[in-house]
Image (spheres, helix red, strand yellow):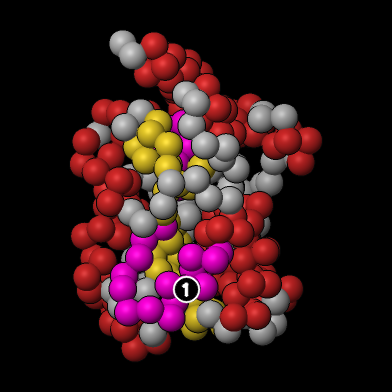
């Protein structure tokens, strides 16, 4: 699979349709596959956390979740990337999952988030096969119970939303115990599906200002990620471009 090296992380040259095509093939196979994402924040963490960076590079797909990653590939002379933020592709995925009869398990968010997300998705996609769900912090079910449930229910796609880099570590450390053909790290995706987090206005997303919207909505929680993190990311990309 073609990829572009951005800050020593190999980002896959796939659009969302290419990712869905891989999922369609993999859910019928007997190999364990992993799909992860990166944005500027993830790549900043990966630049300082070698273990997390190694986990990213061991995944079968690492896709661009932020416009800064798309721009970085262009600056570095890599392939043309597409911004594949989960909140933008989840509805397409649900339609795709209905058509392909894909069995899904949601392991994500705080208490009640996965249940609310499931209910919301079923309202729009009544034929979707969400075979199980649990919060991503094991409040209502223990980690052992969740793993046992996944084994019994046999989902083909396990969505894991625990935040970066915790979800990547969890997937890697439990991958051999999880029989789901596809494990997909999705961050806060199901917080949006559940209505806990608000979506960015479409026009801000189109012009690359999603980060600014997040900063306005949650300045206390996001100031370091964006006010400090964004310039740091740009500096790192420039250094990679110049080879210094």
Residue 130: percent from left, percent from top: 54, 79
Residue 209: percent from left, percent from top: 67, 29
From the image, tell me which residue sits under label 1: 25
Residue 142 in sight in this render: no
Residue 122 relative to residue 19: left or right: right
- Number of labels in the image equals 1
Give the residue displayed 52% in from the left and 59% down from the top: 19
**Depicted 126 relative to depicted 167: above or below:** below
Q: Quadrant of the C terminus?
A: top left
Which quarter of the picture shows residue 135?
bottom left
Based on the picture, tell me whether residue 50 belongs to the magenta stretch.
Answer: no
Task: Give the camera-side residue of 52 and 109.
Answer: 52
Which quarter of the picture shows residue 29?
bottom left
Based on the picture, tell me whether residue 38 belongs to the magenta stretch.
Answer: yes
Task: Give the camera-side residue of 34 and 25.
Answer: 25
* Bounds of the magenta segment: 20-43
Residue 138 relative to residue 235: left or right: left
Residue 18: percent from left, percent from top: 56, 58
Give the residue displayed 36% in from the left and 57% down from the top: 60
Residue 105: percent from left, percent from top: 46, 74
Q: Residues within 10 Å of mark 1 (few under 14, many from 20)?
A: few
């Amino acid at each position: 699979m073609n990829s572009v090296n951005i800050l020593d992380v190999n980002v896959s040259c796939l659009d969302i349709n290419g990712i869905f095509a891989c999922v369609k093939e993999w859910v019928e196979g007997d190999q364990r596959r992993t799909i992860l994402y990166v944005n500027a924040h993830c790549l900043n963490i990966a630049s300082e956390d070698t273990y997390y960076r190694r986990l990213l590079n061991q995944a079968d797909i690492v896709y661009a979740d932020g416009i800064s990653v798309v721009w970085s590939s262009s600056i570095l002379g890599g392939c043309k990337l597409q911004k594949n933020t989960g909140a933008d592709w989840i509805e397409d995925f649900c339609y795709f999952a209905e058509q392909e009869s894909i069995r899904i398990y949601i392991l994500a968010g705080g208490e009640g988030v996965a249940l609310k997300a499931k209910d919301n998705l079923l309202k729009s996609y009544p034929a979707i096969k969400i075979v199980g769900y649990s919060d991503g912090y094991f409040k209502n079910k223990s980690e052992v119970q969740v793993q046992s449930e996944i084994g019994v229910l046999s989902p083909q796609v396990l969505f894991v939303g625990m935040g970066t880099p915790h979800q990547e570590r969890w997937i890697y450390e439990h991958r051999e115990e999880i029989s789901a053909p596809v494990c997909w790290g999705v961050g806060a995706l199901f917080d949006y599906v559940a209505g806990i987090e608000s979506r960015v206005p479409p026009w801000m997303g189109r012009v690359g200002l999603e980060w600014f919207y997040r900063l306005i909505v949650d300045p206390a929680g996001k100031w370091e990620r964006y006010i400090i993190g964004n310039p740091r990311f740009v500096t790192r990309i420039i250094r990679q471009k110049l080879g210094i």
